[in-house]
Amino acid sequence: MKRRTTSSMPCNFGSSSVLPMVLKAAVELGLLEIIERAGPGALLTPAQIASELPTQNPDCPLVLDRLLRLLSGFMGLPQLPSTSLGMVMEFQWHLYYFPCRTSLTSLVDVGGGDDTILNMIISKYPSIKGFNFDLATILDKSPHHPGIKHCSGDMFASIPKGDAICMKVSGYYMLGMTNMVILGAPETSLAARSLFQFDLFVMNTNITGKERTAREFEGLAKEAGFSQIYLACSAYNFSVVELCKRA
Ligand SMILES: C[S@@+](CC[C@H](N)C(=O)[O-])C[C@H]1O[C@@H](n2cnc3c(N)ncnc32)[C@H](O)[C@@H]1O
Protein backbone atom coordinates (compact mmCIF):
# COMPACT_ATOMS: atom_id res chain seq x y z
CA MET A 1 0.00 0.00 0.00
CA LYS A 2 2.86 2.34 0.93
CA ARG A 3 4.60 1.50 -2.37
CA ARG A 4 1.40 2.26 -4.27
CA THR A 5 1.00 5.64 -2.55
CA THR A 6 4.63 6.49 -3.13
CA SER A 7 4.43 5.42 -6.74
CA SER A 8 1.33 7.54 -7.34
CA MET A 9 3.19 10.71 -6.48
CA PRO A 10 4.97 11.20 -9.82
CA CYS A 11 1.59 11.00 -11.57
CA ASN A 12 0.54 14.05 -9.57
CA PHE A 13 3.56 16.11 -10.49
CA GLY A 14 2.46 16.50 -14.12
CA SER A 15 -0.53 18.57 -13.07
CA SER A 16 0.95 20.09 -9.92
CA SER A 17 0.75 23.60 -11.38
CA VAL A 18 -3.02 23.40 -10.84
CA LEU A 19 -3.14 23.87 -7.07
CA PRO A 20 -1.28 27.22 -6.97
CA MET A 21 -3.37 28.45 -9.89
CA VAL A 22 -6.58 27.47 -8.13
CA LEU A 23 -5.43 29.09 -4.88
CA LYS A 24 -4.61 32.29 -6.75
CA ALA A 25 -8.03 32.28 -8.43
CA ALA A 26 -9.75 31.62 -5.09
CA VAL A 27 -7.91 34.54 -3.46
CA GLU A 28 -8.54 36.92 -6.36
CA LEU A 29 -12.23 36.03 -6.54
CA GLY A 30 -12.62 36.26 -2.76
CA LEU A 31 -14.17 32.78 -2.61
CA LEU A 32 -13.10 32.11 0.96
CA GLU A 33 -14.54 35.47 2.08
CA ILE A 34 -17.87 34.61 0.42
CA ILE A 35 -17.94 31.27 2.24
CA GLU A 36 -16.91 32.89 5.53
CA ARG A 37 -19.61 35.57 5.22
CA ALA A 38 -22.25 32.82 4.96
CA GLY A 39 -21.35 31.82 8.53
CA PRO A 40 -20.28 28.60 10.25
CA GLY A 41 -21.98 25.45 8.98
CA ALA A 42 -23.66 27.25 6.04
CA LEU A 43 -24.27 25.04 3.00
CA LEU A 44 -23.69 27.07 -0.14
CA THR A 45 -24.20 25.75 -3.63
CA PRO A 46 -21.71 26.75 -6.34
CA ALA A 47 -24.56 28.72 -7.97
CA GLN A 48 -25.01 30.77 -4.77
CA ILE A 49 -21.31 31.53 -4.63
CA ALA A 50 -21.31 32.40 -8.34
CA SER A 51 -24.18 34.84 -7.80
CA GLU A 52 -21.85 36.91 -5.60
CA LEU A 53 -19.22 37.20 -8.30
CA PRO A 54 -19.17 39.90 -10.98
CA THR A 55 -19.64 37.51 -13.90
CA GLN A 56 -22.34 36.55 -16.38
CA ASN A 57 -20.59 33.31 -17.35
CA PRO A 58 -23.27 30.58 -17.23
CA ASP A 59 -20.56 27.95 -16.64
CA CYS A 60 -19.30 29.74 -13.53
CA PRO A 61 -21.04 27.44 -10.97
CA LEU A 62 -19.63 24.40 -12.71
CA VAL A 63 -16.12 25.78 -12.72
CA LEU A 64 -16.40 26.90 -9.08
CA ASP A 65 -17.63 23.47 -8.07
CA ARG A 66 -14.51 21.89 -9.49
CA LEU A 67 -12.18 24.51 -8.01
CA LEU A 68 -13.70 24.07 -4.55
CA ARG A 69 -13.61 20.29 -4.83
CA LEU A 70 -9.88 20.49 -5.41
CA LEU A 71 -9.35 22.92 -2.53
CA SER A 72 -11.34 20.75 -0.13
CA GLY A 73 -9.33 17.74 -1.29
CA PHE A 74 -6.08 19.47 -0.33
CA MET A 75 -7.16 20.80 3.06
CA GLY A 76 -5.17 19.23 5.90
CA LEU A 77 -2.51 17.83 3.55
CA PRO A 78 -0.34 15.26 5.32
CA GLN A 79 3.43 15.18 4.85
CA LEU A 80 3.99 13.78 1.35
CA PRO A 81 6.37 10.87 0.90
CA SER A 82 9.47 11.15 -1.23
CA THR A 83 9.28 9.04 -4.36
CA SER A 84 10.88 7.60 -7.47
CA LEU A 85 9.94 9.25 -10.78
CA GLY A 86 10.69 6.03 -12.65
CA MET A 87 7.46 4.46 -11.44
CA VAL A 88 5.38 6.62 -13.76
CA MET A 89 6.70 4.62 -16.70
CA GLU A 90 4.80 1.55 -15.53
CA PHE A 91 1.61 2.78 -17.13
CA GLN A 92 3.27 3.38 -20.50
CA TRP A 93 4.20 -0.28 -20.72
CA HIS A 94 0.58 -1.34 -20.71
CA LEU A 95 0.01 0.71 -23.86
CA TYR A 96 3.19 -0.71 -25.32
CA TYR A 97 1.88 -4.27 -25.21
CA PHE A 98 -1.62 -3.51 -26.50
CA PRO A 99 -1.12 -4.22 -30.26
CA CYS A 100 0.25 -7.72 -29.73
CA ARG A 101 -3.30 -8.82 -28.90
CA THR A 102 -4.68 -7.40 -32.14
CA SER A 103 -3.96 -7.55 -35.86
CA LEU A 104 -3.51 -3.88 -36.57
CA THR A 105 -2.01 -2.57 -39.77
CA SER A 106 -2.37 1.10 -38.89
CA LEU A 107 -2.57 3.04 -35.66
CA VAL A 108 -3.40 6.73 -35.27
CA ASP A 109 -2.30 8.53 -32.12
CA VAL A 110 -4.65 11.49 -31.73
CA GLY A 111 -2.92 14.29 -29.84
CA GLY A 112 0.25 12.22 -29.98
CA GLY A 113 2.52 15.16 -29.15
CA ASP A 114 6.18 14.33 -29.67
CA ASP A 115 5.55 10.71 -30.78
CA THR A 116 6.89 9.15 -27.59
CA ILE A 117 4.17 6.54 -27.15
CA LEU A 118 3.65 5.80 -30.85
CA ASN A 119 7.38 5.39 -31.33
CA MET A 120 7.53 2.87 -28.48
CA ILE A 121 4.74 0.87 -30.12
CA ILE A 122 5.96 1.09 -33.73
CA SER A 123 9.54 0.18 -32.81
CA LYS A 124 8.20 -3.02 -31.30
CA TYR A 125 5.65 -3.68 -34.10
CA PRO A 126 7.28 -2.23 -37.26
CA SER A 127 4.63 -3.78 -39.55
CA ILE A 128 2.09 -1.29 -38.14
CA LYS A 129 1.91 2.05 -39.93
CA GLY A 130 1.89 4.83 -37.36
CA PHE A 131 0.21 8.20 -37.78
CA ASN A 132 0.95 10.88 -35.25
CA PHE A 133 -1.87 13.39 -35.37
CA ASP A 134 -1.53 16.72 -33.59
CA LEU A 135 -1.71 20.46 -34.11
CA ALA A 136 0.68 21.78 -36.78
CA THR A 137 2.46 23.99 -34.24
CA ILE A 138 3.27 20.93 -32.12
CA LEU A 139 4.32 18.67 -35.01
CA ASP A 140 6.65 21.36 -36.39
CA LYS A 141 8.74 20.89 -33.25
CA SER A 142 8.34 17.10 -32.90
CA PRO A 143 11.06 14.68 -34.00
CA HIS A 144 10.44 12.27 -36.89
CA HIS A 145 10.70 8.53 -36.19
CA PRO A 146 10.85 5.66 -38.69
CA GLY A 147 7.47 4.16 -39.59
CA ILE A 148 5.53 7.17 -38.29
CA LYS A 149 3.90 9.80 -40.45
CA HIS A 150 3.05 13.16 -38.96
CA CYS A 151 -0.44 14.42 -39.79
CA SER A 152 -1.42 17.87 -38.66
CA GLY A 153 -4.96 19.01 -38.03
CA ASP A 154 -7.63 19.77 -35.49
CA MET A 155 -9.16 16.73 -33.79
CA PHE A 156 -12.44 18.61 -33.47
CA ALA A 157 -12.66 18.92 -37.26
CA SER A 158 -11.56 15.44 -38.41
CA ILE A 159 -8.99 12.77 -37.66
CA PRO A 160 -7.11 10.40 -39.99
CA LYS A 161 -8.52 6.93 -40.55
CA GLY A 162 -6.74 3.90 -39.10
CA ASP A 163 -7.45 0.38 -37.83
CA ALA A 164 -7.23 1.73 -34.30
CA ILE A 165 -7.02 5.09 -32.62
CA CYS A 166 -5.01 5.76 -29.50
CA MET A 167 -5.81 8.80 -27.35
CA LYS A 168 -3.55 9.10 -24.35
CA VAL A 169 -4.61 12.04 -22.21
CA SER A 170 -5.79 13.98 -25.29
CA GLY A 171 -9.14 12.14 -25.17
CA TYR A 172 -10.14 14.51 -22.40
CA TYR A 173 -10.10 17.40 -24.81
CA MET A 174 -12.31 15.69 -27.30
CA LEU A 175 -15.06 14.57 -24.99
CA GLY A 176 -17.60 17.27 -24.24
CA MET A 177 -18.86 17.99 -20.75
CA THR A 178 -22.53 18.19 -19.95
CA ASN A 179 -22.96 17.06 -16.38
CA MET A 180 -22.95 19.15 -13.25
CA VAL A 181 -20.49 17.97 -10.63
CA ILE A 182 -22.03 17.87 -7.18
CA LEU A 183 -19.83 18.96 -4.32
CA GLY A 184 -19.97 16.21 -1.72
CA ALA A 185 -18.01 15.44 1.44
CA PRO A 186 -14.35 16.38 0.98
CA GLU A 187 -12.30 13.55 -0.50
CA THR A 188 -8.75 13.98 0.70
CA SER A 189 -7.06 10.75 -0.38
CA LEU A 190 -4.03 11.05 -2.63
CA ALA A 191 -5.97 9.37 -5.44
CA ALA A 192 -8.86 11.84 -5.10
CA ARG A 193 -6.58 14.86 -4.97
CA SER A 194 -4.77 13.64 -8.04
CA LEU A 195 -8.08 13.17 -9.84
CA PHE A 196 -9.40 16.64 -8.91
CA GLN A 197 -6.10 18.19 -9.88
CA PHE A 198 -6.07 16.51 -13.26
CA ASP A 199 -9.72 17.43 -13.81
CA LEU A 200 -8.82 21.11 -13.55
CA PHE A 201 -5.61 20.68 -15.53
CA VAL A 202 -7.70 19.40 -18.41
CA MET A 203 -10.39 22.04 -17.92
CA ASN A 204 -7.73 24.73 -18.10
CA THR A 205 -6.79 23.47 -21.56
CA ASN A 206 -10.33 23.03 -22.78
CA ILE A 207 -13.40 24.04 -20.80
CA THR A 208 -15.29 20.98 -22.06
CA GLY A 209 -12.72 18.48 -20.78
CA LYS A 210 -13.18 16.71 -17.46
CA GLU A 211 -12.56 13.53 -15.51
CA ARG A 212 -15.46 11.10 -15.85
CA THR A 213 -16.89 8.21 -13.92
CA ALA A 214 -16.74 4.81 -15.62
CA ARG A 215 -20.51 4.98 -16.17
CA GLU A 216 -20.35 8.44 -17.78
CA PHE A 217 -17.55 7.29 -20.03
CA GLU A 218 -19.44 4.15 -21.01
CA GLY A 219 -22.59 6.15 -21.83
CA LEU A 220 -20.60 8.52 -23.98
CA ALA A 221 -18.86 5.69 -25.83
CA LYS A 222 -22.17 3.94 -26.54
CA GLU A 223 -23.69 7.20 -27.77
CA ALA A 224 -20.75 7.53 -30.16
CA GLY A 225 -21.45 4.06 -31.58
CA PHE A 226 -18.94 1.87 -29.73
CA SER A 227 -20.48 -1.45 -28.79
CA GLN A 228 -17.70 -2.86 -26.63
CA ILE A 229 -15.81 -1.14 -23.89
CA TYR A 230 -13.01 -2.83 -21.98
CA LEU A 231 -11.00 -1.58 -19.08
CA ALA A 232 -7.76 -3.18 -20.27
CA CYS A 233 -5.69 -2.23 -17.25
CA SER A 234 -5.16 0.47 -14.67
CA ALA A 235 -2.03 1.86 -13.12
CA TYR A 236 -2.52 4.26 -10.22
CA ASN A 237 -5.10 6.85 -11.36
CA PHE A 238 -4.79 6.07 -15.06
CA SER A 239 -6.50 3.41 -17.13
CA VAL A 240 -6.22 2.00 -20.61
CA VAL A 241 -9.75 1.81 -22.03
CA GLU A 242 -10.39 0.00 -25.29
CA LEU A 243 -13.46 1.00 -27.31
CA CYS A 244 -14.48 -1.31 -30.18
CA LYS A 245 -17.05 -0.71 -32.90
CA ARG A 246 -17.89 -4.37 -33.43
CA ALA A 247 -17.47 -7.73 -31.71
C1 LIG B 1 -1.64 16.29 -22.75
S1 LIG B 1 -0.93 16.17 -24.33
C2 LIG B 1 -0.80 14.42 -24.51
C3 LIG B 1 0.34 14.05 -25.42
C4 LIG B 1 0.57 12.53 -25.53
N1 LIG B 1 -0.61 11.84 -26.02
C5 LIG B 1 0.98 11.96 -24.17
O1 LIG B 1 0.17 11.31 -23.54
O2 LIG B 1 2.10 12.22 -23.76
C6 LIG B 1 -2.34 16.52 -25.39
C7 LIG B 1 -1.97 16.66 -26.86
O3 LIG B 1 -3.18 16.94 -27.57
C8 LIG B 1 -2.87 17.90 -28.57
N2 LIG B 1 -4.07 18.63 -28.95
C9 LIG B 1 -4.77 19.53 -28.20
N3 LIG B 1 -5.81 20.02 -28.90
C10 LIG B 1 -5.76 19.41 -30.12
C11 LIG B 1 -6.58 19.51 -31.29
N4 LIG B 1 -7.64 20.31 -31.33
N5 LIG B 1 -6.27 18.74 -32.36
C12 LIG B 1 -5.19 17.91 -32.33
N6 LIG B 1 -4.38 17.77 -31.25
C13 LIG B 1 -4.67 18.53 -30.17
C14 LIG B 1 -1.83 18.80 -27.89
O4 LIG B 1 -1.10 19.56 -28.83
C15 LIG B 1 -1.01 17.80 -27.12
O5 LIG B 1 0.09 17.34 -27.87
Image: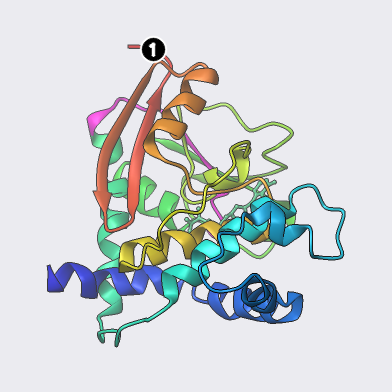
State which quarter of the image contains the C terminus: top left
Nearer the observer, 227 or 209: 209
> The residue tagged with tag 1: helix, strand or loop?
loop
Nearer the observer, 36 or 60: 36
Residue 208: x, y in percent?
A: 66, 45
Q: Amino acid at mark 1?
A: Arg
Query: Is residue 109 rendered magenta in the image?
Result: yes
Q: Total number of numbered labels?
A: 1
Residue 167: x, y in percent?
A: 49, 43
Nearer the observer, 118 or 27: 27
The magenta segment: 101-114
Residue 91: x, y in percent?
A: 29, 56
Write down the residue under mark 1.
246
Query: Is residue 69 rendered magenta in the image?
Result: no
Q: Is residue 200 visible?
A: yes
State which quarter of the image contains the N terminus: bottom left
Q: Quadrant of residue 78?
A: bottom left
Residue at position x 38%, y 46% in the image: 122
Check the image and report above or below for 14 versus 46. Answer: below
Check the image and report above or below for 182 versus 164. Answer: below
**Residue furthest top in the image:** 247
